[in-house]
Image: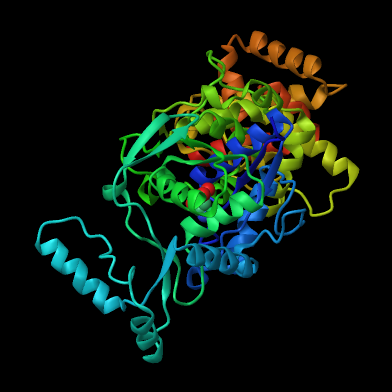
Amino acid sequence: MDAIRVRFAPSPTGSLHIGGARTALFNWLYARKTGGVFVLRLEDTDTERFIAAAAEGIFSTLRWLALGWDEGPDKGGPFGPYAQSERKPLYTAEAQRLLEAGSAFRCYCTPDELAQHREEVRKRGEVARYSGRCRHLTEDERRAKEEQGIRPALRIAAPAEGTTVVTDLVRGEVSFDNRASFDDYIIMKSNGMPTYNFACVVDDHTMGITDVIRAEEHLSNTPKQIIVYHALGYPLPRFAHVPMILAPDRSKLSKRHGATAVEEFREQGYLPEAILNYLALLGWSPGDEREVMGIEEIVSMFSLDSVSKHAAIYDVKKLTWINAQYLSNLPIERVVETVLPFFQARNLVSDQPATQEMEYAIRVIDAVRSRIHTLVELADASAYFFSADFSYDEKGVRKHFTKEGVAQVLTRGREALARVEPFTLEETEKAYREVIGGMEISGGALIHPTRLALSGRTVGPGLFDIIVILGKEKCLARLDRAIAFVNACKA
Ligand code: GLU
């Protein structure tokens, strides 16, 4: 078998969404799995809708996800250029070939004429399709149209009878009735630009693509493209249409279902590792219960045979759960690297942190990272380690700061901590146990208000971890502040 070549071919009309990223991932996985080549192609012929920044945005999101490509617009390769806007001469030449072979024809119908025809057909209760009017124009008729200054579009001369069968690696054989599925559709617009179904075929062939892996939404385009393959005398690639991604209520995924752009997840503090892991599960599974899998493991398990025919359900909760797993289990250096910009954005850590500042941040991150879902949450839940400028959780105040004698309990805790040397986990805990024993109170009666005093919160890492990371000086100052607060409440 020839070396596998697959491609991801985004249209730069917006940012990269979950669906596009999943298509990119499946192509990438297949290339990595088979030792093949992953090509990135920009489908930017739709000039009006082309947004230059969108292309750059898509590239940068793919890079952030670590879905690197082997050939593409930015890095070239043996089959370039890789942006369709730079391949016009090729489409023109291939269209000319079809024209000469009689497999395509010039169409001079104006938009008004086409609309009128559609209307008539609709009135008769038939499916609107091109009338075939310009298929058999004589030379004279053509010349007359040209003299009127009408610039023709090119249409493929498509079969109006029979069926076209798509053999799909995921869906098996899918039959399309030619008459119902397409007409003599336009392959080159009158402005000289190719349409998607034509450019895509010319590119997939000339770029040596062996496997076209794309979303199920494109399945209905495939018979149209097969006609072009046949007309141009190109061999067919293999096709694999990966299943639809639906919202939890099985409706089409849209804005109202929350974030779907990968960038939004990036901003909310999701890790690329977690997003890739989640995307891999949208339409694929390793065949067992495994859900949290590193990318190497996914590559080794991946095959198109195990891609499902059934729609995948998009579930942000699952993604968030996977993200939490990665946050608690990735090597601490990796979590630190990704969360640092979030800390810096909140001014918790300086832009160029000195070694000591970094060491402190690492200890905080390591203590806080379990039970956390996103990097934003992690920065949030770490803030009190860097600044005493926090208010006390209101419920916590009612529960722990209004108890009879709490000022005295906190004072005893403070005195005990002041005496502790060295200020370690064991010693601070021992000192607290002695206060608890000495005052004959429950552990919680000292531990809960201390946590609130030190962090403003009622939940978080182990109290003695907090105490030791903060250090003696900060603990004593925060306990003083809490004691004053409690006394002021009473007064
Ligand atoms: N530009 C098309 C899209 O973004 C590519 C479809 C294909 O992969 O053939 O949907």
Residue 229: give x, y in percent of width and height: 51, 49
Residues 362 and 132: in front is 132
Farthest right residue? 355
Task: Describe residue 433's horizontal placement relative to residue 218 as left or right.
Answer: right
Farthest left residue? 124
In the displayed structure, 104 sits above or below 5; it is below
Residues 164 and 101: in front is 101
Q: Is residue 345 visible?
A: yes
Q: What residue do we see at 81% from left, 37% from top?
A: 360
In the displayed structure, 13 sits above or below 383; it is below
Q: What residue do we see at 56% from left, 31% from top?
A: 280
Residue 228: give x, y in percent of width and height: 48, 53
The quadrant the N terminus occupies is top right
Residues 57 and 156: in front is 156
Residues 312 and 34: in front is 34
Looking at the picture, the colour scheme in use is: rainbow
Total marks in image: 0
Residue 405: give x, y in percent of width and height: 54, 24
Q: What residue do we see at 52% from left, 65% from top?
A: 95
Residue 209: give x, y in percent of width and height: 63, 44
In the displayed structure, 487 sits above or below 109; it is above
Q: What residue do we see at 27% from left, 49% from top?
A: 179
In the displayed structure, 82 sits above or below 370; it is below
Task: Describe residue 116's horizontal placement relative to residue 29 as left or right.
Answer: left
Q: Is residue 401 visible?
A: no
Farthest front residue? 139
Displayed quadrant of residue 392: top right
